[in-house]
Image: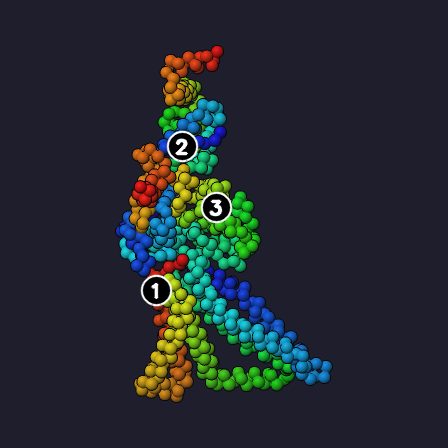
C-alpha cells in the first residue's frame, strides 16, 4: 500500500486517514505494534513531526494507544474498529454520490444504479 | 586545534615533498658514485647529464616550494577548500598560523636538502673519514672551543632566527598580497601580483629610510660592536612588518571573506 | 542554551554595492525541518553562508544557538555547501578522520555504514569518483555529524529524481532529532512533504514564514503552488501586457 498525498490539504490528516485505513484493513492487526515514527515517516517520505501529529490523531480517535514502553499499539477494541470502519465506509459512499452528482445523476438514480450493479 | 590543523597541513606537505626530497637525495647519492669515480678514478663525461638532472631537481624543488606556499593559501583557504576550512570550529588566525608554520618548515626543509646533498655527492668516503682518529681530536677541540665561548651557539641560533624571520616576512607578504587580491571580485591574481610587488617596494623603501635615520644608524653601530644585538635587531626589523601583514591577513579573512 | 536556534535581526548583506539581503528578521526553533525557498539570486546561499560563518553581515545581528557566529557555532552547525570542497588527493576515510578530529559529534561508524548503504567505497580516492559519488560523500560527512543545525544548500539540485528521493530519505533518517534542518532549494514539490516550515525569500527579504500545514490550510493549495503564484505573477503579467 502506497502513501498518496494530495496538494490542496494539510498533510497530517491525510496521513492519519491512511493509517486508519491500514488498521481497518488489517495491515496493522489489532494489538500489534505500529512501526516507529521515523520508519513510517521515511517510508512515506514525510517529516517525522508530521507523522507524529498523524499518529497523535489516531490516539485521539482511539485507534491506537501509547505502549507501556516505547511505541504505539493498535487498539483491540472491536467497537472502536467497527466505528472507524463505518466512518470510512460512509466517506466512500459520500464520495460515490458526489462523483455521480458530478455526472448529472440524482441521488435516487445513483442509488438504483448501485443496486442494479449489485444484482 | 592548532595542532590538529598542523597535522593535516603537514600531511599534505609530506605527500608532495617526501617524493621530491627523496628524489634529490637519491640523485645526489647516484651522482656520488657515477660522477667522480669510474675505474680509472677519472671524471666521467657521460655523467654530466646526471649532474644536470640533479641541478634541475634542486631548482624544481624550490619552484615547487614557492608554488606550494601560494597554493596552500590561495586554493586551500580562498578556493573551494575554504568552504571546509572556514567552517571548522577554529579561528581564522589558527588557519593562517598553521599554513605559515607548514610553509616555513617546507622552505627550511628544501634548504636543508639543498645544503646536504652536495656533501652526499662529494667524492669522499665518509666511512673511512669517520674512522680517522683525527675526528675525536677535532670533536674535543670544537667542544672545548664552544665551552670556552658559549656565545657561538647563541650566534648560531640568532643566525637561524634571522633566516626564519626572513622566510616568515616573505610568506606573510605573499599571504597579504593574496588576501588583498581576494577583496576584489575580478582579476584577483593580477591584483595579488601587483600587491606583492608593491609590498616589496614598500619594504625596501622603508628599510632605506629607517637605515638612513641617524638614530637607527647609531643603534646599528652599537649593534655591530655587539653581534648578538645586530642579529636580533635584523630579526626584529623583519618580524615586525611580518606580524603586521599577518594581522591584516587575519582581519581580512575574518571580516571580508567572500568565497565564490 | 537558547530556545531559538537561529535568530536574525535586521540582517543586511551586500557585496560591494549589490545588496543580497535587505533586512531579514528570522527566528527558527529546534527540532524543525525548514525549507528556505526562493528563485536563484534571492539570497538563499547568502543567508546560509552567514549562518555557517563564511560571510560576515554588513549590518544587523545574527545568532546561532544563542551565540554570535564563531568557533562554538561552527562546532554545532553541519554545512553542506553547493559545491565540492575537498582536496582531490584525499580518500573519503581521510575526510572522516579530519571530521572526527575537529567535530566531537562525528560518528565514524555511522559514516561508514552510510557509505555502504549509498554504495560508496570509502577507501577510494576522491579523484577517481564521479561527481555524484563525491556529492554522496559530502552528504555522508554532513549527516554523520550530530549537530544542532544542519544547513543544506541546494542538496537536490542537479541530481536525478531517484537520487533526489534517496537524498531526502537519507536526510530524514539520519538527522539528529533535536536538530533543525534548513534546506535551501527552488525545487519545492520534491521536498514539500518533508518540511515543517517554509520560508519564502524574494530579493533579499522574507516574504513569508509559515508552517506548511498552515499554508495548506489557509491557502487551500500546496506550498509549491503558492510559490509559483508568488514568484511568477509578475512575469506572466508582463507577458499578458505584451500580448495585447
- Residue located farthest toward the top when viewing the structure as drawn: A119
Position of residue B199 measured from the top left corner of the image (x, y, whole percent): 38, 74
Q: What number is the disc on residue B35?
A: none
Mark 2 to mark 1: distance in Å?
Answer: 52 Å
Position of residue C40 measured from the top left corner of the image (x, y, whole percent): 38, 49
According to the picture, the residue beneath numbered tag 1 turns out to be: B251
Q: For label 1, count other residues whose C-alpha is less than 10 Å away and answer few (under 14), some (14-19) or many (20+).
A: some
According to the picture, the residue beneath numbered tag 2 turns out to be: A6
Please tell me which residue is depicted at 38% across the width and 56% down the height of the picture.
C54
Depth order, front residue of B112/C238? C238
B212, above or below C18, in the image:
below
User: Which SS class for mark 2?
Assistant: loop
Please tell me which residue is depicted at 47% across the width and 83% down the height of the picture.
B152
B193, above or below C206, in the image:
below
Q: Are marks 2 and 1 in contact (CB under 8 Å)?
A: no
According to the picture, the residue beneath numbered tag 3 turns out to be: C159
Depth order, front residue of A95/A59? A95
- Residue located farthest toward the front when viewing the structure as drawn: C244
Mark 1 to mark 3: distance in Å?
Answer: 38 Å
For disc 3, the chain is C
Please tell me which residue is depicted at 31% across the width and 55% down the height of the picture.
C19
Amino acid at each position: 500500500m502506497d502513501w498518496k498525498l494530495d496538494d490542496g490539504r494539510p498533510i497530517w490528516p491525510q496521513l492519519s486517514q491512511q493509517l486508519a485505513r491500514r488498521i481497518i484493513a488489517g495491515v496493522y492487526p489489532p494489538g500489534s505494534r505500529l512501526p516507529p515514527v521515523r520508519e513510517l515517516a521515511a517510508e512515506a517520505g514525510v517529516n517525522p513531526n508530521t507523522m507524529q501529529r498523524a499518529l497523535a490523531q489516531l490516539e485521539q480517535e482511539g485507534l491506537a494507544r501509547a505502549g507501556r514502553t516505547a511505541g504505539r499499539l493498535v487498539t483491540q477494541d472491536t467497537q472502536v474498529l467497527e466505528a472507524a470502519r463505518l466512518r470510512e465506509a460512509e466517506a466512500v459512499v459520500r464520495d460515490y454520490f458526489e462523483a455521480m452528482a458530478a455526472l448529472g445523476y440524482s441521488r435516487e438514480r445513483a442509488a438504483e444504479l448501485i443496486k442494479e450493479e449489485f444484482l | 586545534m592548532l595542532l590538529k590543523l598542523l597535522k593535516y597541513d603537514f600531511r599534505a606537505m609530506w605527500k608532495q615533498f617526501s617524493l621530491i626530497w627523496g628524489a634529490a637525495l637519491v640523485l645526489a647519492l647516484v651522482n656520488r658514485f657515477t660522477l667522480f669515480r669510474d675505474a680509472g678514478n677519472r671524471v666521467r663525461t657521460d655523467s654530466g647529464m646526471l649532474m644536470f638532472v640533479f641541478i634541475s631537481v634542486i631548482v624544481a624543488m624550490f619552484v615547487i616550494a614557492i608554488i606550494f606556499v601560494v597554493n596552500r593559501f590561495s586554493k586551500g583557504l580562498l578556493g573551494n577548500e575554504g568552504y571546509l576550512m572556514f567552517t571548522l570550529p577554529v579561528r581564522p588566525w589558527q588557519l593562517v598560523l598553521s599554513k605559515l608554520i607548514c610553509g616555513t618548515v617546507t622552505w627550511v626543509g628544501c634548504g636543508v636538502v639543498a645544503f646536504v646533498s652536495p656533501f652526499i655527492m662529494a667524492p669522499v668516503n665518509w666511512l673511512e673519514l669517520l674512522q680517522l682518529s683525527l675526528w675525536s681530536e677535532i670533536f674535543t677541540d670544537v667542544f672545548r672551543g664552544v665551552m670556552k665561548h658559549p656565545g657561538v651557539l647563541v650566534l648560531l641560533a640568532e643566525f637561524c632566527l634571522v633566516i626564519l624571520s626572513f622566510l616568515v616576512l616573505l610568506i606573510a607578504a605573499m599571504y597579504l598580497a593574496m588576501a588583498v587580491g581576494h577583496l576584489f571580485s575580478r582579476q584577483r591574481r593580477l591584483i595579488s601580483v601587483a600587491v606583492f610587488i608593491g609590498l616589496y617596494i614598500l619594504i625596501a623603501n622603508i628599510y632605506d629610510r629607517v637605515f638612513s635615520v641617524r638614530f637607527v644608524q647609531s643603534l646599528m653601530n652599537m649593534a655591530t660592536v655587539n653581534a648578538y644585538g645586530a642579529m636580533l635587531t635584523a630579526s626584529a626589523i623583519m618580524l615586525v612588518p611580518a606580524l603586521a601583514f599577518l594581522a591584516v591577513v587575519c582581519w581580512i579573512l575574518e571580516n571580508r571573506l567572500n568565497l565564490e | 542554551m537558547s530556545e531559538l536556534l537561529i535568530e536574525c535581526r535586521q540582517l543586511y548583506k551586500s557585496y560591494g554595492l549589490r545588496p543580497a539581503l535587505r533586512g531579514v528578521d528570522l527566528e527558527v526553533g529546534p527540532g524543525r525541518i525548514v525549507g528556505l525557498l526562493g528563485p536563484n539570486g534571492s539570497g538563499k546561499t547568502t543567508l546560509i553562508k552567514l549562518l555557517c560563518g563564511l560571510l560576515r553581515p554588513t549590518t544587523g545581528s545574527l545568532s546561532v544557538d544563542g551565540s554570535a557566529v564563531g568557533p562554538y557555532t561552527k562546532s554545532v552547525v553541519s554545512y553542506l555547501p553547493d559545491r565540492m570542497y575537498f582536496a582531490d588527493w584525499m580518500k573519503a576515510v581521510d575526510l572522516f578522520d579530519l571530521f572526527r578530529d575537529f567535530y566531537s559529534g562525528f560518528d565514524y561508524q555511522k559514516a561508514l555504514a552510510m557509505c555502504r548503504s549509498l554504495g560508496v567505497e570509502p577507501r577510494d580516492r576522491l579523484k577517481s569518483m564521479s561527481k555524484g559519488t563525491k556529492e554522496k560523500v559530502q552528504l555522508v560527512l554532513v549527516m554523520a555529524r550530530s549537530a544542532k543545525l544542519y544547513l543544506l544548500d541546494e542538496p537536490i539540485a542537479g541530481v536525478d529524481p531517484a537520487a533526489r528521493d534517496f537524498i531526502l530519505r537519507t536526510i530524514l533518517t539520519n538527522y539528529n532529532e533535536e536538530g533543525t534542518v534548513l534546506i535551501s532549494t527552488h525545487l519545492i514539490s520534491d521536498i514539500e512533504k518533508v518540511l515543517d516550515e517554509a520560508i519564502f525569500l524574494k530579493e533579499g527579504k522574507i516574504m513569508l514564514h509559515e508552517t506548511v500545514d498552515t499554508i495548506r490550510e489557509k491557502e487551500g493549495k500546496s506550498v509549491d503552488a503558492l510559490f509559483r503564484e508568488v514568484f511568477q505573477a509578475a512575469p506572466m503579467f508582463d507577458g499578458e501586457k505584451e500580448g495585447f
